[in-house]
């Protein structure tokens, strides 16, 4: 298996757990998972789709190297099938550009969407045209246009792949901001996919779901025709509506049906409170996937979970990391938990690693202690996972 992405260590563990070995050569690998941004800018990791100065042709030339690897695989092994997965994270203007360029983008699209009727948007757009230098606007437009031309090239070559995901920008931008060049581009991208008859392999997916580890597990879940019922629970008993929508989107993506506690195959327990005195009671014998969204310095949920008699039911654990998007924390927990249904055994190594990476390390840092001072709870974790 060959993969190029930004979650190497995690993907390593999942791939090994599923019985794959890593390869550095695309042309000898039976499975290829690629985050295209990492592949395109592999020689300069400071560059990405939001800050480069390449032309569309230069981007396409780099992409064509990937296609050449595929052609060489087919020449060398004409009777073999290579599974090829590609993810492209689309870039939103608000998170990746200065405020003035974001506003210019916003009013530009708002005026265009009104078909020339929104005079206020036109006036704001013209003001920004005057305040932003022509060279800055030109660089910004050239980069976005190069990206779109590059995406079109990818869509036209979709038959080289089994699956191409264009991962959408954050839903909050669509719901609250509603306008911007990035939103217009996504709408145009969907049109290009249809026009090039690429819908069977290319699609725009919800924000956050481009994780290669998640898609690795999804493929095996589909191959084994696994269909699960999942119940969503939270410490507050009232999840944030936007968070609930993201979890439901994740469930739908993984062919999981949201169900009652009685009918579920697993429970996703989200701790969305900063201080707890009791672990929420889950009246079910099914596996529990846990996500802790409290600050790194708040140990309550993690430690109480570790000491709880129901810890044997815990099949995944993830505490939100510093600067990590909430949906990514949830995806880490769900990905790990679903491995149980594929391999039919508890992925205890991943739970242990996540406790060390997400709980003990940040807690020791927050308290100004050495991690060795947590010997007793670490020993407790080891003992419980060895059962």
Image (tube, rainbow, N blue to C red):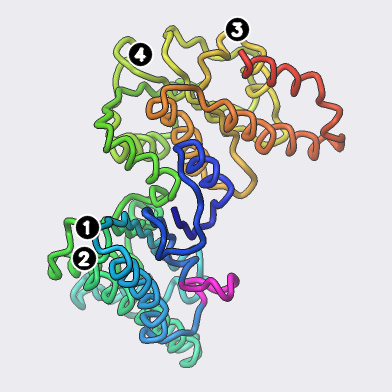
In primary-sequence order, the first of circles 1 and 2 is 2
Q: Nearer the viewer, residue 311 or 61?
A: 61
Mark 4 in CB contact with mark 2 (< 8 angstroms): no
Q: Which residue is mark 4?
A: 261
Mark 2 in CB contact with mark 3 (< 8 angstroms): no
Q: Which residue is mark 3?
A: 309
CA gap, disc 2 to disc 3? Answer: 52 Å
Q: Secondary structure at mark 2?
A: helix
In primary-sequence order, the first of circles 3 and 4 is 4
CA gap, disc 3 to disc 4? Answer: 19 Å
52 horizontally vs 59: left or right = right
Q: Which residue is mark 2?
A: 159
Mark 1 in CB contact with mark 2 (< 8 angstroms): yes
Rendered residue at 46%/73% (across/down): 40
Q: Is residue 98 visible?
A: no
In primary-sequence order, the first of circles 1 and 4 is 1
In primary-sequence order, the first of circles 1 and 3 is 1
CA gap, disc 4 to disc 2? Answer: 42 Å
43 horizontally vs 36: left or right = right
Q: Is residue 227 visible?
A: yes
* Quarter occupied by residue 228: top left
Q: Which residue is mark 1?
A: 201
Q: Which residues are magenta?
A: 40-51
* Quarter occupied by residue 83: bottom left
Asked if residue 60 lies in the magenta stretch, the reply is: no
Question: Mark 4 packing: few (<14 Cα in 10 Å), some, or many (20+)?
Answer: some
Residue 128 vertical position relative to residue 17 in the rendered view, above or below: below
């Amino acid at each position: 298996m060959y993969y190029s992405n930004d979650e190497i260590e995690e993907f390593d563990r999942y791939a090994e757990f599923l019985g794959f070995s890593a390869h550095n050569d695309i042309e000898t690998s039976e499975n290829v998972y690629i985050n295209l941004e990492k592949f395109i800018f592999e020689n300069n990791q400071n560059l990405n789709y939001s800050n480069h100065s390449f032309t569309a042709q230069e981007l396409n030339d780099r992409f064509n190297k990937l296609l050449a690897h595929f052609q060489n695989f087919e020449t060398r092994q004409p009777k073999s099938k290579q599974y090829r997965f590609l993810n492209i994270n689309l870039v939103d203007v608000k998170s990746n550009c200065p405020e003035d360029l974001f506003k210019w983008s916003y009013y530009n699209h708002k005026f265009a969407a009104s078909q020339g009727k929104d005079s206020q948007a036109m006036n704001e757009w013209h003001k920004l045209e005057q305040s932003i230098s022509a060279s800055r606007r030109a660089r910004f437009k050239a980069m976005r246009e190069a990206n779109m031309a590059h995406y079109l090239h990818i869509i036209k070559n979709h038959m080289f792949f089994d699956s191409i995901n264009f991962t959408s920008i954050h839903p909050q931008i669509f719901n609250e901001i509603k306008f911007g060049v990035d939103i217009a581009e996504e709408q145009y991208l969907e049109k290009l996919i249809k026009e090039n008859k690429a819908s069977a392999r290319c699609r725009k997916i919800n924000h956050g779901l481009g994780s290669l580890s998640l898609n690795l597990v999804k493929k095996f879940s589909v191959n084994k025709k696994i269909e699960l019922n999942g119940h969503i629970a939270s410490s507050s008993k009232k999840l944030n509506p936007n968070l609930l929508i993201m979890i439901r989107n994740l469930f739908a993506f993984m062919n999981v049906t949201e169900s009652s506690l009685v009918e579920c195959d697993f429970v996703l327990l989200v701790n969305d409170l900063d201080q707890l005195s009791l672990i929420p009671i889950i009246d079910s014998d099914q596996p529990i996937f846990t996500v802790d969204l409290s600050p790194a310095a708040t140990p309550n949920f993690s430690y109480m979970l570790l000491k709880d008699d129901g810890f044997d039911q815990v099949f995944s654990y993830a505490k939100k990391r510093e600067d990590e998007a909430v949906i990514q924390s949830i995806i880490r927990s769900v990905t790990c938990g679903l491995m149980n249904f594929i391999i039919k055994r508890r992925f205890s190594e991943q739970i242990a690693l996540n406790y060390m990476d997400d709980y003990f390390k940040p807690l020791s840092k927050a308290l100004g202690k050495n991690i060795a001072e947590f010997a007793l709870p670490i020993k407790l974790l080891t003992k419980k996972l060895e059962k």
